[in-house]
Image (cartoon, rainbow, N blue to C red):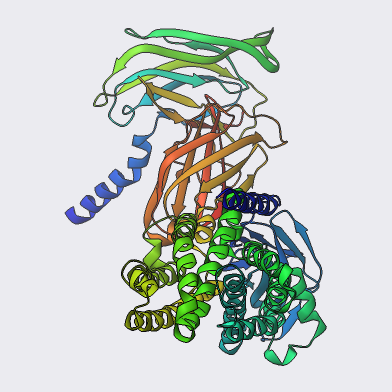
Amino acid sequence: MNRMLAGSLAWLVAMLVAMLVLAMPGRALAHAALVATDPADGAVLTQGPGQFSLTFSEPVSPLVLTLVRPDGSQLALTSFRLKDQTVEIDNPETLKSGTHVLSWRVVSVDGHPVGGSALFSIGAPSAAPVAGEAVDWTLRAMVWVARLFLYAGLFLGVGGAFALAWLAEDRRCGQRFVAAALLFGLASAPLSLGLQGLDGLGAPLAQFAAPTVWRTALETSFVWTVVIGLIALGLALVSLAGPSGLRKLSASAALLAVGAALAVSGHASAAEPQWLTRPLVFLHGTAIAFWAGSLAPLGLALRQQPAEAKVFLRRFSRAILPVVAVLAASGIVLAIIQVQQPAALIHTAYGRLLLLKLTLLLFLFTLAAINRWTLTAPAQAGDTEVQRRMVRSIGIEMLIVLAIFGVADGWRFTPPPRALAIAAAQPVSIHVHALKAMADLSITPGHAGEVAASIMIMTGDFGPLDAKAVTLVLSKPDSGIEPIKRPARKPGDGTWRIDNLAIPLPGRWNARLDILVSDFEMVKIEAPIDIRGE
Amino acid sequence: MKKYLLAAGVLCAFGTNAALAHITLETQEAAVGSTYKAVLRVPHGCEGKATTAVRVQIPEGVIAVKPMPKPGWTLQVKKGKYEKSYQLYGETLTTGVKEVDWSGGNLPDEFYDEFVFRASLAADLPAGQMLYFPVVQECGDAAERWIEIPAAGQDEDALETPAPGIKLLPKK
């Protein structure tokens, strides 16, 4: 009993240390979403700007930046600077009149590349050239398959090696299966990395071997998942085929490494608060590996060696309840962080994948519960008919588990509602400068609907301006809507605020600020402001 | 014929409508170097509320201001330094009235009233240009500010709350 206690204590300590290490690099990370572009999307300019800028919801690293000219020819933009969340790009040439497309592809800290484009016109709009942002479905499918194999290697292979080392009485059953899963994982890990590079650059499959593809891949956080994943797979192989003294130790280390591999990249790991999400992803991944990994060796043992399998089954059924509790609890918290609003479950691709995963989980839990509470006792007692039923049930569980891996793999391509919400909540800001006064106006969130406006006013030469009153007048002459006129109030922090402002339509509005400098002097300054769609 | 008269009447009504809604000066032109009697016409309150105070800012170059007291209203002036000195009947003026306030009164929205002051227009004011007298109309907590001065080239009719003004004529 004391030894058991000491054993579980050692486990606990190991887990805590691993969680601490993972929680350490606590930077503000999230899936990047575009917040603003300059020139604004749809803008019409009299002449080409000297530089372009893209502002994101978090710091990003550009992978490909292209300017598509009105005639469809492309110009690679290679000279850019990073300033916090903004990418400033030099415009190397004088732009001809017509509609241009600024096409971008960046990678954010969660390791997922995102891309998009902004249209702007010089002189007058022309037919928009084709930006070439089409989705390469073959590449996507390959990214998905390679990841699925990697998951299979990590969860079924490493988890299986752990189950063989710690739970199984006779380690021969399922050994081949586990070894095969590990080899699949080892093969698909580098493949996955290369495909990540291709996806990052939006390059075709033919360039798989190109050095830039691999350099790009090495710059994303996914490379850490691959490296730690390879370590996990290697440790699991050592546990499987190495000296028996190292078996349990290396299996444990491999299992922890699976959790760590998942925690270093991905949407969920990149979410805030980092001290919570990374350890949760770690626990979630480790628990999945334990559960999913045990299924195949257990099923095979029950089928081939029913007598010895009893011990395996007893140990597994004793351990599985707390593991599933950790799995479910961490999964629920992560889902809440990622989805935020229940409505997002239906309205976003991410939410729909989560619903699909939850449905599959419902089946899985039902099967597992039947196994645990109705079949385990007679199976342990040696009822061969029940043992056969259990083997079949475990086989179905395996299939559902694979399907769940496939669904979770799909999240690779969908930004979570959390990131979409961050993007939607970004304010739009303008700076209005006139001779007598200037102002910074920001509208939060920067889309149509219920918003609040915050205004900072200064004299024309950056001095303090103590106005008696400030009124915001928003007009959209092309919409037929009467100007919206709202007095601002002074909350006492040096700004002027307007709460409960409703902007009925997205698009380009004219914002005018009537600043009452003294009883008899009013300064009016105005500028256009682009309000996003909801 | 009757039709034409009617049309003309309608046109008149609409044409003057804008002017009627604002606070304006009765005499809209005056020669520089002359004495000017300013009659501020207050046609209504602030969005239905009764007018309780009328305050007018005296522009530079308008000197020797003497407001006319008004029964039921407290009359006050604010004095200050002129930007430069002016000669008037051999005297050198460097300070004078900068603001005239009639307050504490009650002029319901449905009634009309006038507020009067007399002043000298300095001889060196630029003839041919407009001279504006910004007015703040107070109605308890609310206020209408007739203080907008058109920028160069801007149409006065485009302003929502224009300041009353006069056209300066050459010295007689």
Front residue of A222/B72: it is: A222
Front residue of A449/B5: it is: A449
Query: In the image, residue A25 lies at what x, y percent?
Result: 71, 52
At 36% from the left and 72% from the top, the residue drawn is A381
Front residue of A66/A97: it is: A66
Query: In the image, residue A446 lies at what x, y percent?
Result: 51, 53
Position of residue A88 relative to residue B55, above or below, is: below
**Left or right of A457 in this view: A381:** left
Q: Quadrant of residue A149?
A: bottom right
Query: In the image, residue A88 lies at what x, y percent?
Result: 74, 61
At 56% from the left and 58% from the top, the residue drawn is A283
Q: Quadrant of residue A492?
A: top right
Position of residue A184 relative to residue A532, above or below, is: below
Q: Quadrant of residue B121?
A: top right
Position of residue A287 relative to residue A27, above or below, is: below
In the orientation shown, which residue stands out farthest toward the bottom? A206
